[in-house]
Image: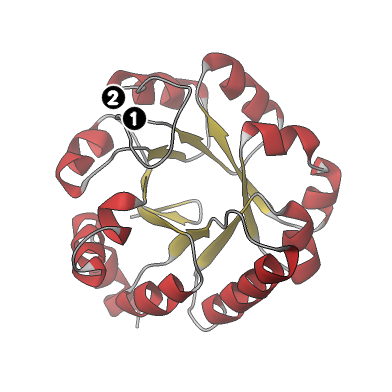
Amino acid sequence: MKTAGIYGFYPVVDDVRWLRRFLPLGVRTVQLRIKEQSTSAVQRQIREALAIAADYDDCQMIINDYWREAITLGANWLHLGQDDLAGADRAAIRAAGIKLGISTHSPKELANALDAKPNYLALGPIYETTLKKMPWSPQGLARIGEWKARCSVPLVAIGGITLERAQAVRAAGADAIAVVSDVLSASHPEDRARAWLDLFGEAAALAQIG
């Protein structure tokens, strides 16, 4: 399933090496979220990620946080949290033609994100997550429907979502599901990614296109 450029299965990875494992499987929306690395290392990873993604038709390679590098290196997609959004040059991002996704955790943040006219919104954490310490309580499924009623762009659900919980999240109204631990920490990440692709029917759709 694809909505306005975003495919339903949306893995978030911490290293460019994951792209070489997932993109050949049919993954076409992926976020590179790099933490605690040097500027040169960040630039190298982003440059390499964009080069890898360019080999796959209709691949949405989303860069997390590093909006200056995204502009300089020619990224098409960017994802910002609320703190990063506050310090980003929105005019420069738009002038570069970069599509923007924004994280939200509260009604106030939703209003702030909508003011920035994003191309998609992310809501989380839907469930409790151990990936990182979060100041926000789990949002729950009902809030997905609340957000959908207030926005006209694709809604990405994130946080504690496993393959087993995915159908309930989709039924609640999420257009896409961002996944971290359920895939990256799996004993066989490629097999888990294939199962996610099958859930959304994306691998089969890409095979038909090809």
Q: Which residue is mark 1?
A: 126
- Res 196 → quadrant: bottom left
Which secondary structure, mark 2? helix
Residue at the disc numbered 2: 141
Decide which of 17, 165 is in the foreground and name it.
Answer: 17
Of 87 and 39, the residue lying toward us: 39
The image quadrant that residue 10 belongs to is bottom left
Residue placed most toward the observer, 41 or 97: 41
The answer to whether residue 138 is left or right of residue 64 is left
Q: Residue at 70% across / 63% down in the picture?
A: 38
Quadrant for the N terminus, please: bottom left
Q: Residue at x 36, y 37 (%)?
A: 159
| In contact (CB < 8 Å): disc 1 and disc 2 | yes
Q: Which residue is most to the top?
A: 108
What numbered label is drawn on residue 187?
none
| Marks 1 and 2, how far apart at CA | 7 Å
